């Protein structure tokens, strides 16, 4: 997976692209200039830079989160004639207002170190659904979960 960080000067619009489905790789000078909600699950983005294609994924930092992103897939893309390197894209993803950010403390059962786990769940999810999303997030962070016990990546690497 090839990702490029773009627009680091404006954190509310900071994003990175996933180029797994794209023909062009490592195109420098990308910038996300604006993003807005069109309707639930549909977003409009404007930016500059070349090499985007329909099917690419843009990861938008979630407001209020330190580490979480919202993956948005480019559904439609238009390159503008003037200025030549600017584009507009229609993106598809989770309805943003339906998501809620949670922070739970997780303790490694081997070294007893506490870790603030940040994860996203849909607004109105019950505790079982929140636990599922938390476990999924732990897995992406290389934690091991077995029989209700949690093992941090460092302890997993030492014992594995």
Image (tube, grey):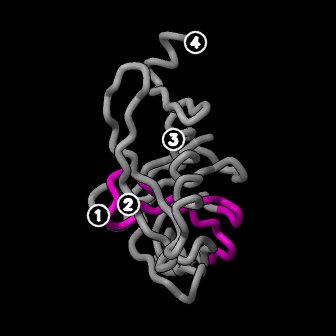
Q: In this view of the protein, which residue sits in the foreground, 101 or 48?
A: 101
Image quadrant where one finds the N terminus: top right
Gap in angstroms between the C-alphas marked 2 and 3:
23 Å
Looking at the rendered structure, the number of numbered marks drawn on it comes to 4
The residue labelled by disc 2 is 14
Please tell me whether mark 3 sits on a helix, a strand or a loop. Answer: helix
The residue labelled by disc 4 is 160
Please tell me whether mark 2 sits on a helix, a strand or a loop. Answer: loop
Q: Position of residue 16 (x, y in %)?
A: 48, 54
In this rendering, which labeled residue sits more in front, label 2 or label 3? 3
For mark 2, does the 10 Å Cα neighbourhood hold few (<14), some (14 to 19), or many (20 or more) residues?
many
Q: In this view of the protein, which residue sits in the foreground, 20 or 82?
A: 20
Q: In this view of the protein, which residue sits in the foreground, 15 or 51?
A: 15
Gap in angstroms between the C-alphas marked 4 and 3:
17 Å
Q: Position of residue 69 (x, y in %)?
A: 47, 58
In this rendering, which labeled residue sits more in front, label 1 or label 4? 4
């Amino acid at each position: 997976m090839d990702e490029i960080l773009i627009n680091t000067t404006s954190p509310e619009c900071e994003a990175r692209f996933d180029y797994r489905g794209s023909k062009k790789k490592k195109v420098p000078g990308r910038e996300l200039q604006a993003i807005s909600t069109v309707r639930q699950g549909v977003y409009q983005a404007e930016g500059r830079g070349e090499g985007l294609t329909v099917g690419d994924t843009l990861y938008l930092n979630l407001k209020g989160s330190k580490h979480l992103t919202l993956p948005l897939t480019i559904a439609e893309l238009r390159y503008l004639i003037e200025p030549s390197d600017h584009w507009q894209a229609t993106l598809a993803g989770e309805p943003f207002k339906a998501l809620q950010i949670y922070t739970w403390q997780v303790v490694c059962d081997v070294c007893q170190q506490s870790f603030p786990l940040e994860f996203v769940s849909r607004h109105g999810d019950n505790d079982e659904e929140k636990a599922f999303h938390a476990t999924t997030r732990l897995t992406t962070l290389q934690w091991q979960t077995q029989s209700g016990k949690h093992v941090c990546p460092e302890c997993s690497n030492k014992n594995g």
